[in-house]
Image (cartoon, grey):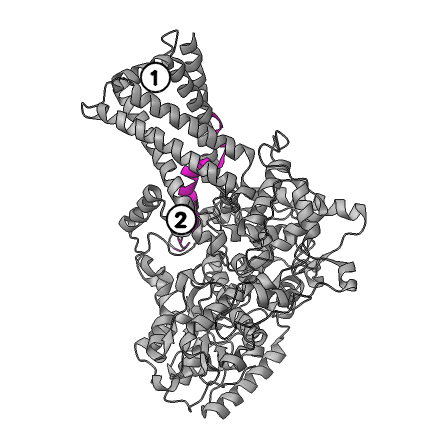
Amino acid sequence: MTGILIGGWVWFCVGVFVVGCLWKAFRYATAPVHLRWDLYPVAHEPRRDHGGSYLEEREWWTKPSRKDRLGELGVMAAEILLLKGVWEHNRRVWWGSLMFHWGLYLLTLTTVGLGLEVVGLARGWLVPMLAVTGTAGGAGTAVGALILLGMRAFDPLLRPYTSPADRANLLVLCAFGTLSAFVAAWTPGMETVARRLADPLRFRGSAMDPLWAAQMAVGGLFLLYFPATRMVHFFAKYFTYHKVRWDDEPVAGNPRLAARLSAALDFGVDWSASHVQTGRTWAEVATELPEATKGGGND
Amino acid sequence: MTDVSIRTREELAEFLERYEGVDVSALLPLPHPYEDWADEPIPLLSESQAERIAPGPDGVAAAQIPLPKTEEERERLVAGFLEGLRKLLTKENNWTFLQPLLLSLENCVKCQSCAEACPIYTGSGRVEYYRPTFRSEVLRKIVNRYLKPAGGLFPKFRGLDIDLDWETVIALAESSYRCTLCRRCAQACPVGLDNGLISREIRKLFSQELGIAMPELHEKGTVKQLTVGSSTGLNPAGLADIMEFAEEDIQEKTGLDITMPFDVEGADYLVMHNAGEFLSWPENLQAFAIILEAAGIKWTLSSELVGYDSVNYGLFYDDVQYSRIALKHYEVAKKLGVKAMLVGECGHAHKALMPIADRLIPDELRVRTESCLVLLEDLVVNEKLLLDPSRNDFPVTLHDPCNITRSMGIVQPQRNILRKIAPRFREMEPHGVYNYCCGGGSGFAICSSLNFPDWRSRVSGRLKFRQILEAFADCIDADTKKYVCAPCSNCKGQMRDLINYYQAWNRCGILYGGLVELIVNAMVDVREGFIDWEMH
């Protein structure tokens, strides 16, 4: 019975996680194209080392567009794998944060590996490795979360900006990491781990070891609330970097972009200040000067 | 550090109540020869001013928000703010910046990596109200509490225990004018969020919904520009007088006969100057004229309303006003049929006319735009001008305007020029895209009302002034004349005020100016001594 309940809970949580993340990503992705707001250095710029852009060239519009995609991947790898930004700007937080993030990376890898084992796609060498990644991932998540929790409780810079929900989230992750580390370290053979985790998800097996049940229940809980939190930054960063900071695409030669911008100019405006003609389109508001503007002031 | 929590409404109220001004003794210390420098306190508003205007919790007033006196006025302010906030989050009203705003509002992990990157927060001695995340966090709490369907659910647990009242609204409005939009915090954000953008969007909400904005930006800025022709108040007749004077001045100073070209159709470049140069730094436009003529470039100025002033303060607070001015600029250029617009030494005009306008200008008005720094680099580095660098044999450092470097990636041209013409050029640290704002960005430098200039000199410009002193540490004596090259009108205004406030001309021999002045000062064809070593 426990197995069926846990299986149902985890599937429900996975469903909420997937739908919630997709909805948020869809919302970001379908937001109207915005005015440029690039910030240098831009990773795909060949002049990245000094933070330069194509605007450093005379008659830049006559030059072919050059983008260093390999360099961009390098910048992304340093950010994702080493948290380079945190290292450079907030080293106190870096140690705990790196451990925490790597813990989650390893747990994700372990989950994928276990999934491959369940469907029979895992190679011989992979399965023993999962005990290592699972244990290290669980421990990293737990210790990293504990360090961050401590900092959020005692650091005068972080404490005022930490809510009880933030602390609860770190506690959940600490518990999940600890339970995952135990499961991975003390179960003989990852084949057994894979099977024991898969059984409830296939609604098989009536009773579960409390440790296993707790690990899956807490993991599910984490997935359940995940999309409603700022942890969605794991995919939101794609938009913040590629669609804002590094978006240096000029309109010329990009008819698709021009069409999207043209459509935006037809949006109706209902701002209330007297210098804006409420009820008109952006194009009209921008081209027709209302009488109120001539008066000026804090209207 | 002022340890102020903003978690609860009570704590915020207490903060607003007991906060009476900036503690000048806690400001960032300055190096030699300012070890004994003692700042005067920032004056609070006079009694009569305080009866009319609501300042921020630091006692400073930038937006000059009329003090709501009756309960009805207060309720109207709060309701209007919430309505504006709702509009700010709709694609129809805010397609221009909705995506970056949503991303910045919803993904902050509150790691505070941005705090130490902010020159105002660190320059102030780490006043909580100036922390980059302070205003963002207050806005975030209000959005999540008042505009989200489940906002009232477990507010304390979710950190949304903030009650919205008129004082909070005013504190938030004023706080958006304690950020120069320099975006250094955004560079430091590992998630890629932008507290500078949030500040700008708060300003926009107040302007476009409630008609509240810093008067120097709105009524004396964009409104004046759209109606009179320039935010300086300069009309076409005044412009003609100034240009006549400039021609005479060039003749007198350099011996060159130059006629300022106006409305030349089909010119290579329509040169877009910040009209502030015409009135405050005429040597800058004169230097441009000398260089362009010497290089044999076919150039022109415009005499049309708005066309002779590259300023676009809408960039700092209002998308509607920004769009109107940007369209006018492009209309003027298109009508003249010039090959390109050349943006003069003005940082925000660079950003307003180039990357931002790029996505706003309809195809039929599209005109190419180029930075003056790129053209000047070509002329200097490729020796299209005859130059004698020994004429600039004095210490020079370079201030990087944020809009040109951090927001546009134009970094090397100005350095390549200085390496060629200024043998004693030295960098500030940090520099380039990692520079510190001058402290006058986003319209601060033009705000001369009430106690804001006092705050600007002491707080927002503190770190930049320290950088300048450090750059000249090896020659800080007053007898060695030194030059801060600031290729931006707004930054020059701030440099002037910093040098005056800290008496840096008398104490250290530090002067400021643009880049073209240095180039002309080194031009062999021009009589020696173009740079006038006098503080004004």
The residues colored magenta run: A224-252
| Identity of the residue drawn at 47% across and 30% down | A171
Q: Residue at x 63, y 60 (%)?
A: B22
Q: Which mark is residue A91?
A: 2
Front position in the image: A87 or B241: A87
Report x, y in % for residue A124. 18, 22
Farthest residue in the front direction? B36
For residue A197, the mark is: 1
Badge 2 density bin: few <14, some 14–19, many ≥20, Cα 10 Å: some
Cβ atoms under marks 2 and 1 closer than 8 Å: no
Quarter location, residue B38: bottom right
Instruction: Identify the subunit bearing mark 1.
Output: A
Residue B26 screen position, x and y as percent:
58, 61
Rendered-image quadrant of the N terminus of chain A:
top left
Find numbered disc 1 in the image and state the secondary structure of the residue it sits on: helix
The answer for which chain carries disc 2 is A
Instruction: State yes or no: residue A196 in magenta.
Output: no
In the picture, measured across the screen, residue B19 lies left or right of residue B476, that is right
Q: Is residue A242 magenta?
A: yes
Q: Is residue A131 above or below residue B510?
A: above
Left or right for B135, reference B357: right
The residue under the point 32% across, 42% down is A81
Mark 1, other Cα within 10 Å: few <14 / some 14–19 / many ≥20: many
Residue B503 visible in this rendered orientation of the protein: yes
Q: Secondary structure at mark 2?
A: helix
Farthest right residue in view: B70
Dominant secondary-structure state across the stretch colored magenta: helix
